Amino acid sequence: MREITYAQAINEALRQSMQQDERVVLLGEDIGCYGGVFQVTAGLLEEFGPERVVDTPISEAGFVGASVGAALTGMRPVTEIMFIDFTTVCMDMIVNQMAKMHYMFGGRGKVPMVLRTNIGAGRGTAAQHSQSFHAIFMHIPGLYVAAPSTPYDAKGLMIAAIQNENPVIFVEHKKLYIEKGPVPEESYTIPFGQAEIKREGKDITIVATHALVQRSLNAAGEAAKEGIDVEIVDPRTLVPLDKETILNSVKKTGRLIVADEGHKTCGAAAEITALVAEEAIYYLKAPVKRVCSPDTPVPFSPPLERAFIPDEKYLVPAIKSLMEYA
């Protein structure tokens, strides 16, 4: 199978969806002529024109509000917020409008829209362009939250998100955009709420999101040299969350690490940890470990940023420490 990048996979998902359904339109800053800050929408303006690929003013509240209205009246907008940091300036539109319209009007109105954005540190873009607070959207009833870790998952989940009748927060990871992987040329979907076991093992479960999936696979390879067999579970969507796959893995291994680039306090890892504590605590042989970003702003200083990022340097010691428990 041919290999393409994560960014190209999302671009292909958008292109195929726009070819198949004329209601699909794109909105966002610099997504047209420039092709998006990470080139995810490159070439789409030339193919579909300015009525379907709309370069918006720098007014997130305005164009997210316009997207909500468009979705309510029959369109299927895919709206880009350049960095997740900028969702803070349109939070009312996301939390109080996008998420709640269907509920508040007794199901008579639907908001079938996708809000694309990205997380992740590691590019030296400092505290206002590097955050990973995707867990905020897990807390808001009415929103679906996608978290693809591979090009294959990114394409399938994006097409599924566009076809979904509910509003979806589609959280990409900026460090994954250049990563390549096998992706079918044809259109396909990945169901929301269906996790994937990226690596099978019997000693420890790591539930990992986004870039932490590959970092966990790398750490599992290191652990294997010492005879430790690690299973990697990728939820792929955080809302809905595939609880069954996570719990079954923990019941098999008896040990759990949750790896997520969000902050440790009240993050996605905290929610998954609480789930296991509530429903599988008697299967645990050791305390649950979380490998997350520390509760500080993302540093600009390159050495501090490297220390900030949760990766193999924290995952490998966490794996070894859990094996100290019988």
Image (cartoon, rainbow, N blue to C red):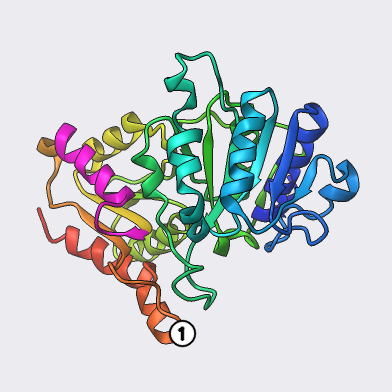
Residue 228 can be seen, yes or no: yes
**Frontmost residue, 117 versus 194:** 117
**Frontmost residue, 137 versus 286:** 137
- With 234 as the anchor, is 191 left or right in this view? right
Q: Which residues are magenta?
A: 262-280
Relative image position of residue 92 (x, y in whole percent): 45, 44
**Frontmost residue, 78 versus 19:** 78
The part of the image, by quadrant, that contains residue 321 is: bottom left
Magenta stretch: dominant secondary structure? helix
Q: Is residue 191 above or below residue 288?
A: above
Crowding at dot 1, Cα within 10 Å, few <14 / some 14-19 / many 20+, comes out as: some
Task: Give yes or no for residue 278 being in the magenta stretch.
Answer: yes
Q: Is residue 70 above or below residue 128?
A: above
Q: How many marks?
A: 1
**Frontmost residue, 236 versus 298:** 298
Relative image position of residue 283 (x, y in whole percent): 14, 37
Relative image position of residue 130 (x, y in whole percent): 48, 67
Residue occupying the point 48% across, 60% down: 85
The part of the image, by quadrant, that contains residue 138 is: top left
Give the residue type at disc 1. Pro
- With 220 as the anchor, is 278 left or right in this view? left
Residue 156 can be seen, yes or no: no
Relative image position of residue 141 (x, y in whole percent): 37, 32
- With 184 as the anchor, is 163 left or right in this view? left
Residue occupying the point 23% across, 45% down: 273
The part of the image, by quadrant, that contains residue 38 is: bottom right
Q: Which residue is mark 1?
A: 302
Secondary element type, mark 1: helix
